[in-house]
Amino acid sequence: MSPQINILITGATGYVGGSVLDRLLKHPEASSFKISAIVRSEEKGRKIENLGVESIIGSYEADDLSFLTDAASRADVVFAIVSGGYVLCIQLHRSSIPHKANSDHLPSARAILHGMKRKFKQSGKAPVLIHTSGTAIVMDDSRGLTSEHMIFSDLDVEKLNLLPETALHRNVDIPLIEADKEGFVKVYLITPGTIFGVPTGQLVDLGLQNTHSMQIPFIVKPSITRKQGGYIGKGLNTWSAISHEEVVDLYIILFDAIRNSPDNVAHGTEGYYFAENFEYSGIELARATSEALVELGIGSSSEPSAFTQEELDTFFGPIWPLLATNSYAKGDRSRALGWKPKCTKKEFLENVKFETKQLLAESK
C-alpha cells in the first residue's frame, strides 16, 4: 500500500489549477493522495469538498497569510498554480494599482516557504514545491516591431540563472531557487508560454473553474470593441505557445517523475521546465480575431489593423509594451521527462476564433 501523500494546491479553481486538481483526483494512485485546496469563498469550499478535497478558505489579498503557511506546513507536495506575472501586471493596471507592483505575489510565496520550512524541520525530509512561472522571464521589449530575439532552452541553466530580478516572474523565482539551495524544499518551476484551449472536467461541470485563457482575451476584448482584430506596432512580436491540456500533462508527468525517481529530476537552479510547442505572432492572433468577427457579422474586414496610440492608451494604459514582446522558449528538459506535446498553430488559431465568439457572447 502506497504511503499517503499530502498535497496542497493553490489556484485550484483557475484556468490551469482546476484541471491539475481534476487530473489528481482521477490519477491511478489517487487513493493515496490527501488533497487540500485554497479557495476564496465558503460556497466554492462546499462544492470542492463534494469532490473529496479539503477546502481552505483564504485570499492572497489578505493582510494575514498565516493560512497559507499552516496549509503548506502539512503538505508533502505543493502545487502553486496562480496567474502569471505577465497577466497580473495588466490586472494591476486595470485595478488602478500602480503597475510597478511585484509581477508575481511574493508575500504568498514566502508564506508557503515558511510553511514548507516548518514541514522540513518536523519531518527531516524536504517537501516538494511545483511552482508556476512563465516564459515572460525571457521576453524582450520589441513593441511589435521585430520578431528577432534570443531562443532560450530550459537546459540553458547559466543563462536562465543570470536573468535579472526585474524580469517578470523572477522576483518570485529567485527566492524560491534560493530556498532550494538552503535544502529545506525542492523547487520545480513549470514555465509555460501562451496557454490556449478550453478546459473540461469536474470543476468545470460544477461551475468552479475559469475556462478562458489568460493572455488571449487581453487582445481579443479590445478587438471586439473596435470591431476589428488589432496588433501592436507591426504585429511581428512572437511568442511560444502550448495547449492547456498539454500544460496539465506536464504537471502530472513531473509530479510522477519526482515521486518515482526523485534523484533523476532536476530542481532549484536547474529546475525550469518550459512548456511550448510552436510560435505565433501578434498579427496572426489579430487576423484570426478579425476573421471571427467577420463570421459573426460584427467586423467588416478579415484583415487586422494596428492599434493606434490612443487605443493603446485607452485599452491597455502604460503596460501596453508587455503585450508586444518576443518570447522564444524550448522545453528540452520537459521533453526529457517523456512529455510529448502535439498541438499546433492551426489549433491555436482555431481556438482564438472560438474565444472571440465566446467573449462576444458573454459581453452581451
Image (cartoon, rainbow, N blue to C red):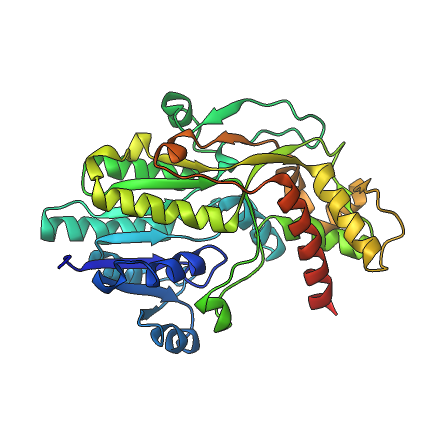
Give the answer, above or below, for where 155 lies relative to 20: above
Quarter-of-image position of residue 163: top left
Q: How many numbered marks appear?
A: 0
Report the residue at 43% width, 78% height from top.
Answer: 43
Q: Residue at x 38, y 27 (%)?
A: 161
In front: 52, or 44? 52
Residue sitting nearer the eye, 144 or 65:
144
Question: Is residue 167 in view?
Answer: no
Residue 19 drawn at (x, y percent): 44, 58
Q: Is residue 67 above or below residue 349?
A: below
Q: Where in the figure is residue 265, as x and y percent of width and height?
A: 27, 35
Report if residue 244 is visible in the image: yes
Q: Which quarter of the figure is the N terminus placed in?
A: bottom left
Q: Is residue 156 left or right of residue 227?
A: left
Q: Is residue 312 left or right of residue 138?
A: right
Q: Is residue 112 left or right of residue 290?
A: left
Which residue occupies the foreground of this view, 25 or 65? 25
In which quarter of the view is residue 340 placed? top left
Q: Residue at x 75, y 70 (%)?
A: 364
Q: Relative to the observer, which residue lies in front, 337 or 112?
A: 337
Expressed as whole percent of the image width and height from the top left, the position of residue 83 reads 48, 52
Residue drawn at the location 38% of the way across and 72% of the way down: 48
